[in-house]
Image (cartoon, rainbow, N blue to C red):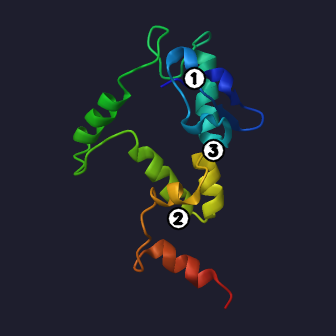
C-alpha cells in the first residue's frame, strides 16, 4: 500500500522496504531490507512509473495510497470462485512456499521474509507432500 517508485533500483533490480512512520506504516522489527525483483515485474513497474510521472504511491489513487487492497483481493477471489478466504497476509505464505518449491534454501527465504528467527519462517510454509511432482524432480536430480 505504501510502495513508492523511488524505492526501486531499476539498475540493480531491487526494491528497498522501509518504514514510513508519517503514514503509520512500520516494518515488523523495524528492519529495512533490500529485495530482488523479478526482471519482468521490474519492467512492468518501470513502464508504469514512466507512464505516470510524478506519482507518489504505486497503488495510489489521487495521490493517496489505496487502502482498499483487501477488498480488491477479495472481489477478485470471488470472481475466480476461490474456495478459501482471501486475506493479504496469505501472499506472504505463497511467496515463501513458491521460493522453497523453486529450490531457494530456507535461510535465504528467512532473510527475504525479514524474519529474525527460523521458526517464524517455518510457520508460513506448507509441507511439500511426498506425492508432489516438484519434490520428485528434486529427488531425481540428486547424484546419489
Q: Position of residue 143 (x, y in %)?
A: 68, 87
Q: Position of residue 26 (x, y in %)?
A: 54, 28
Q: Give the Cα separation between the discs numbered 3 and 2.
A: 16 Å
Identify the residue at image location x=33%, y=35%.
73
Crowding near pointer 1: few (<14 within 10 Å), some, many (20+)?
A: some
Residue 91, placed above or below residue 17 = below
Q: Nearer the viewer, residue 33 or 134?
A: 33
Mark 2 or mark 1: which comes first in sequence? 1
Q: Nearer the viewer, mark 1 or mark 3?
A: 3
Quarter assignment of residue 27:
top right
Mark 3 or mark 2: which comes first in sequence? 3
Residue 33, placed above or below residue 121 = above
Q: Kindly state the secondary structure of the residue where label 3 is placed.
A: loop
Q: Is residue 14 visible?
A: yes
The residue tagged 1 is 48
Q: Nearer the viewer, residue 37 or 51?
A: 37
Q: Kindly state the secondary structure of the residue where label 2 is placed.
A: helix
Q: Give the Cα separation between the discs numbered 1 and 3.
A: 15 Å
Quarter assignment of residue 41:
top right
The reply to whether the C-beta atoms of the residues labelled 3 and 2 are less than 8 Å apart is no
The residue tagged 3 is 38
**Mark drawn on residue 101:** 2
Amino acid at each position: 500500500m505504501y510502495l513508492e517508485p523511488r524505492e526501486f533500483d531499476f539498475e540493480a533490480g531491487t526494491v528497498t522496504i522501509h518504514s514510513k512512520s508519517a503514514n503509520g506504516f512500520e516494518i515488523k522489527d523495524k528492519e529495512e531490507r533490500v529485495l530482488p525483483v523479478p526482471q519482468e515485474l521490474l519492467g512492468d513497474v518501470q513502464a508504469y512509473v514512466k507512464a505516470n510521472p510524478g506519482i507518489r504511491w504505486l497503488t495510489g489513487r489521487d495521490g493517496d495510497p489505496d487502502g482498499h487492497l483487501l477488498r480488491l483481493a477479495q472481489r477478485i477471489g470471488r470472481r475466480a470462485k476461490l474456495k478459501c478466504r482471501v486475506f493479504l497476509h496469505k501472499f506472504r505464505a505463497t511467496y515463501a512456499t513458491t521460493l522453497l518449491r523453486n529450490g531457494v534454501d530456507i535461510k535465504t527465504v528467512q532473510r527475504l521474509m525479514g524474519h529474525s528467527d527460523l521458526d517464524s519462517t517455518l510457520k508460513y510454509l506448507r509441507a511439500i507432500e511426498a506425492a508432489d511432482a516438484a519434490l520428485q524432480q528434486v529427488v531425481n536430480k540428486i547424484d546419489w
